[in-house]
Amino acid sequence: MKLTRAEKIWLAAVIIFYACYNLPFVPAYGHAKATLIHGLITLIPLWISVYIGLVKICRIYRLRDPQAQKSSPGAETPPETDTKTSLSSQTTAGEITKEDTSC
């Protein structure tokens, strides 16, 4: 699978902000002001880049609607399953019987 330009930019941004956030000894231990500045510079942009990237990537790769696939005339039907081993054929109203759980 080839990465798109949006995925490459998203990956680079997340890696850069994650690496900056995890620098050892930055900020110095015990300094509240330095911790807040460090969080503003690294953690918030990391969250923003992750969520904006997720939205953009989800727009590129939309999930397929299973109902639309089944109703389309060219769609292949799945092979029939054996009724003895199929859990859905043995259950009624979503209940599992003792016969279903035995091996």
Image: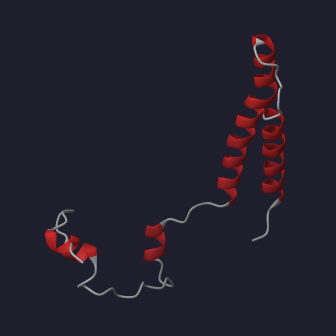
Residue 82, x across and y down, in percent? 29, 87
Along the horizontal axis of the image, is 50 left or right of 93? right
Residue 28, x across and y down, in percent? 82, 19
How many marks on residues?
0
Residue 68, x across and y down, in percent? 47, 70
**Viewer-side residue, 61 vs 92:** 92
Task: Look at the image and tell me in which quarter the N terminus lies.
Answer: bottom right
Tell me, what colour scheme is on the image? secondary structure
**Viewer-side residue, 46 vs 48:** 46
Along the horizontal axis of the image, is 48 left or right of 69? right
**Viewer-side residue, 27 vs 87:** 27
Q: Residue at x 27, y 74 (%)?
A: 87
Above or below for 35 versus 103: above
Task: Look at the image and tell me in which quarter the C terminus lies.
Answer: bottom left
Q: Residue at x 40, y 88 (%)?
A: 79
**Viewer-side residue, 6 vs 98:** 98
Tell me the quarter of the picture where residue 35 sits.
Answer: top right
Q: Residue at x 78, y 55 (%)?
A: 7
Along the horizontal axis of the image, is 29 left or right of 85? right
